[in-house]
Image: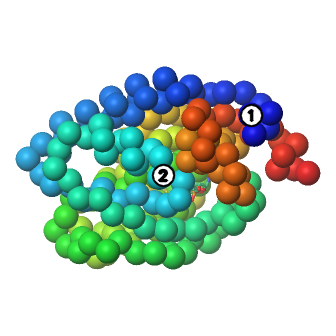
């Protein structure tokens, strides 16, 4: 598995620090509120579990499944909500937790979906932001840990064809893996 990684971008220690800082910021910003934190599966599952433990605040957790990719390393352009939140979002302060903001199509759909269900506010928290990627939708991260370039990254929840999610660091996948 490690042999398929071209280079490491963020170590376990880098991630731990960034996630803890972000958790503190969110706890400060939402003091006195009881936010509903919604993880977008599957890519956010490791980030979400570390992040919520860094948010020292009463909050509710939920998950959604939204698909835009299949097994390809490029966006397919369509977003489908496969699993909705269980919670009633009416009047709630929602924080969407995502692994990576690429074209932003996924988050635009998810944000629009939750807003239309009557959320009081909807903010976006992403682990990674592909800053140079062309954003299809006018959606920006309210909270993020790291910027990345336009490369295919894996690890800490992010996959290629369901592999590499369990890497403890975030790295760039060798091109030969997804171009063969
Ligand atoms: P978007 O809708 O184009 O912003 O795509 C977001 C989704 O595509 C993410 O939630 C990931 O599942 C997937 N994705 C985009 N770029 C990468 C990457 O570099 N590595 C792994 N998954 C990615």
Between label 1 and label 2, give the one nearer the viewer: 1
Label 2 secondary element: loop
The residue that mark 1 highlights is: 2
Taking the spot 53% from the left edge, 34% from the top edge, the residue there is 147
Q: CA distance from mark 1 to mark 2?
A: 21 Å
Q: Are marks 1 and 2 in contact (CB under 8 Å)?
A: no
If you read the primary sequence from the N terminus, does the residue marked by circle 1 or circle 2 appear first?
1
Tell me the quarter of the picture where residue 154 sits.
top right
Is disc 2's CB within 8 Å of ligand 1?
Answer: yes
Q: In what quadrant of the picture does the N terminus appear?
A: top right
Which residue is painted at 47% across and 46% down in the image?
Answer: 46
Residue at x 39%, y 34% (from the top left corner): 19
Residue drawn 40% across the image and 75% down it: 84
Residue 148 shows up from this direction: no
Q: Is residue 162 left or right of residue 175?
A: left
> Quick one: SS at disc 1?
helix
Question: Whole-percent x and y of residue 92?
Answer: 19, 64
List x then y, in percent, for residue 81: 49, 74
Q: Position of residue 53 (x, y in %)?
A: 30, 41
- Within 8 Å of ligand 1, the CB of disc 1? no
Q: To which residue does mark 2 refer?
A: 44
* Residue 168 x, y percent position in the rendering: 57, 35
């Amino acid at each position: 598995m490690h042999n398929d990684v071209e280079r490491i971008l963020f170590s376990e220690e880098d991630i731990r620090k960034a996630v803890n800082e972000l958790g503190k910021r969110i706890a400060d910003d939402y003091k006195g509120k009881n936010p509903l934190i919604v993880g977008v599966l599957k890519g956010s599952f490791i980030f979400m579990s570390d992040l919520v433990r860094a948010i020292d605040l009463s909050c509710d957790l939920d998950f959604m499944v939204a698909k835009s990719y299949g097994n390809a390393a490029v966006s397919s352009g369509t977003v489908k909500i496969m699993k909705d939140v269980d919670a009633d979002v009416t009047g709630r302060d929602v924080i969407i937790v995502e692994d990576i903001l690429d074209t932003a199509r996924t988050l635009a759909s998810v944000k629009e979906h939750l807003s239309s269900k009557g959320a009081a506010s909807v903010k976006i928290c992403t682990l990674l932001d592909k800053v140079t990627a062309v954003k299809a939708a006018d959606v920006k991260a309210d909270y993020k840990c790291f910027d990345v370039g336009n490369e295919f990254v894996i690890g800490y929840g992010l996959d290629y064809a369901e592999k590499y999610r369990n890497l403890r660091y975030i790295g760039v996948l060798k091109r030969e893996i997804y171009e063969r």
